Image: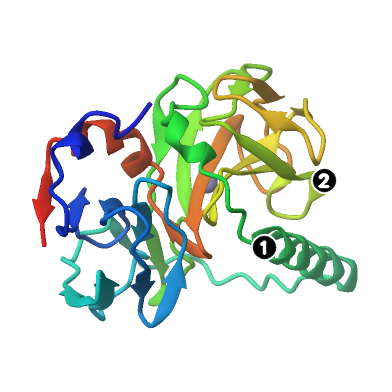
Amino acid sequence: MIFSLVFLSSQAGATELCGKLAQGEIVFGKATPKSEVMLNGEKILTTEDGVFVMAFGRDDKKSQVLETDGEKYQIKIEPTKWNVQNIKGVPPQKVTPSDSDLEAIELERKLLRASLKGIKDLAAWRSGFIRPVDGRISGEFGGQRIMNDVPKNPHQGMDIAAKEGTEVKASADGEVVLAYPDLFYSGNVVVVDHGFGLQTIYAHLKEIKCQRGDKVKKGDIIGLVGKTGRATGPHLHWGASLRGIRFNPQSLLDAEEHQNHCRML
Ligand SMILES: [Zn+2]
């Protein structure tokens, strides 16, 4: 279980943050048990022992305001260098989505947005996180291409290349809040909610092996690697978000290690 170790050292009245205070990272904190924690003026959930979660988006620049035990802290976010490729001289091609494509894109947007709604007061994320499949990372979070000076959308997750049909595991305990076939970009997709607004997404699946509402344990098989939706080859697109802020899922894997990099505020 994560955080069972380091937080034992926490002193009463002190707030501690563990992780990198940088763009694209998730950070776990601990306040005095039962104290109210506010982030940017909004109350956020804490566990009984005072643990809370915050994340910084790829392009977050503004510092965040954290309030615990009646103390206010300004959290400065360090910039992260993202892999940006400038590609010039690409033959201009006109890609106008058809009406049916637009409808499909809109449906996907709605479903993904709806799955973000409702923050569960359940700290399933305390199981800790594992990589959902083994394999080479073929696309990193935050990467972006600029084609003929037109910036494309930055990559919102981590791509892991694996053979078609490889089993995909739930990266932590949680509940399946979306299991939907054949979306325009994501193909067959699963979203697992780990509580406190922390979710992971698994896209381009060949097959979905769970249903909406299923409670899953870390390591349970939820699908098979595929190339459905917009994918050129078989891989898993694994994404993570906290209260709607997308961050680098790698930082979930680093969380255990980050327990050794905590600071008192
Ligand atoms: Zn991807």
Q: Give residue 178's position: percent from left, percent from top.
A: 75, 47
How packed is label 2: few (under 14 Cα within 10 Å), some, or many (20 or more)? some
Quarter containing the N terminus = top left
In which quarter of the view is residue 145 placed?
Answer: bottom left
Which of 154 and 111 lies nearest the eye of the viewer? 111
In the rendered structure, find residue 150 and report the number of the disc placed on it.
none
Numbered marks: total: 2
How packed is label 1: few (under 14 Cα within 10 Å), some, or many (20 or more)? few
Label 1 vs 2, first from the N-terminus: 1
Q: Which residue is mark 2?
A: 182
Query: Residue 7 vs residue 247: left or right?
Result: left
Name which residue type carries label 1: Gly
Q: Give residue 129's position: percent from left, percent from top.
A: 43, 31
Q: Which residue is mark 1?
A: 118
In which quarter of the view is residue 163 placed?
Answer: top right
- Is residue 254 visible to us here? no
Query: Residue 68 vs residue 196: left or right?
Result: left
